[in-house]
Amino acid sequence: MKVLVVGSGAREHALAWKLSQSPHVTKIYAAPGSDGIAAVAEPVAIKPDALNDLVSFAKEQKIDLTVVGPEDPLVNGIVDLFQRKNLRIFGPTAKAARLEGSKAYAKDVMSRHGIQTGGHKVYDKAEPAREYLNNCDYPVVIKADGLAAGKGVMICKTQEEAEAAIAESMVEKRFGEAGRRVLIEDFLQGEEVSVHAISDGHNILPLCLAQDHKPVGEGDTGENTGGMGTYSPLPQITDEQIAVLERDVVVQTIHAMNREGEPYKGTLFTGCMMTKQGPKVLEYNVRFGDPETQSIMMRMKGDLFEVLSATIDGKLDTVEVDWDPRSVVTVVLASGGYPRTYEKGYKIKGLDADFGPDVQVFHAGTKKVDGDWYTNGGRVMSVVALGSDLKDAREKAYAAVDKIHFDKMIYRKDIGFRGLRG
Ligand code: GLY
């Protein structure tokens, strides 16, 4: 079977790596992929937003299954387009992908179906939004309604900060059309967890729980990024809490989408806050998380191709997946200045080191020139390690990180700290 992975980050590298282990898979392409992903998937020079070119490629190459990494093509209807051309693709339709594409839509679905989430208001104009800020409690969360490349969520500690966020989004249009409408949400206290599940619209396959570290600095300080590291499992979250997350969030959402007439097929990644009143949904994502996927794929025991294929066929109940009981830690190596401005082209040393069987390096912003590796983005790579427990996995991950070097390399040294607090 021939598989096409759409995207070029460490998440897509992890997906291609896992797919490459399937006996069903004979060839993997990645569009556009990267020199790093080339170890498992042949790069194809087509960008993820070139939907018609992706269709033509899939037709020409007789691709048996396509899986999409980033959210934009899903929200822009890649699944609908492939389906119209009788091409097999894993993911939600554009209508179902509005769960991520419009935060206001997601809130409407949650309120119609009694799914627990924080209180919120939606504004299309700046003036009433500013008025609301006179009377709300702080901190408050201001979110651009649409897709804003992970930058559209602003936690504002004071009214002044909130007014600046409204101006940035609605007046200065920092996020373009995506920030024309904003949500002002209650700030929820608790521990944030990443809940992944795959659904064929009826059956649900919960994936293992992970926790991301979004701010760039240790102790969750500094600007928010796409995620600086993850770990799984989470020792501080009980099996009972996981069962509640599955029942009250995942099952409820899949049921809600059926009731809405928009059955959800694909990966549903829900960001949840574990509050004192129980889990509350912070946001939905209609794709695999990055860097959650790097940890999840490392623990998955089973055939990812079979899972994706069975989802497309509505037969997810026919596949079995187990989870490695060991712990995984993923550390993201980034280029200094990320998530704002950073330089590219620094030589990367140490990638040829012997990392051992429990470590994988998934490439994101890297490039190979004349046999040497160079940085080629802000998120450069993910270093992933399995260990007997969280402490061991963390030690192995950082031992591997110590073997890699490039100028201005930054990474968080505290991935997994919440799980180790005891
Ligand atoms: N790690 C967060 C995300 O993928 O959106």
Image (spheres, grey):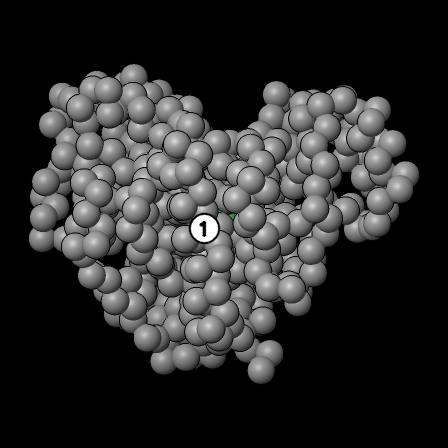
Q: Is residue 23 left or right of residue 347?
A: left
Residue 118 vs residue 331, the one in the foreground: 118
* Identity of the residue drawn at 80% across and 30% down: 129
The answer to whether one can see residue 281 in this image is yes
Q: Residues within 10 Å of mark 1 (few under 14, many from 20)?
A: some
Q: Quadrant of residue 143?
A: top right
Q: Position of residue 248 (x, y in %)?
A: 49, 57
- On-image quarter of the C terminus: bottom right
Q: Is residue 18 left or right of residue 363?
A: left
Q: Position of residue 326 (x, y in %)?
A: 34, 75
Instruction: Name the residue type under label 1.
Output: Gln
Q: Which residue is mark 1?
A: 252
Q: Position of residue 370 (x, y in %)?
A: 30, 40
* Identity of the residue drawn at 21% across and 54% down: 317
- Judged from the image, the secondary structure of the residue bearing numbered disc 1 is helix
Q: Position of residue 188 (x, y in %)?
A: 69, 55
The answer to whether one can see residue 360 in this image is no
Q: Quadrant of residue 296?
A: bottom left
Q: Is residue 174 above or below residue 308?
A: above
Q: Is residue 92 above or below residue 204?
A: above
Residue 376 vs residue 407, the one in the foreground: 376
* Identity of the residue drawn at 76% across and 22% down: 125
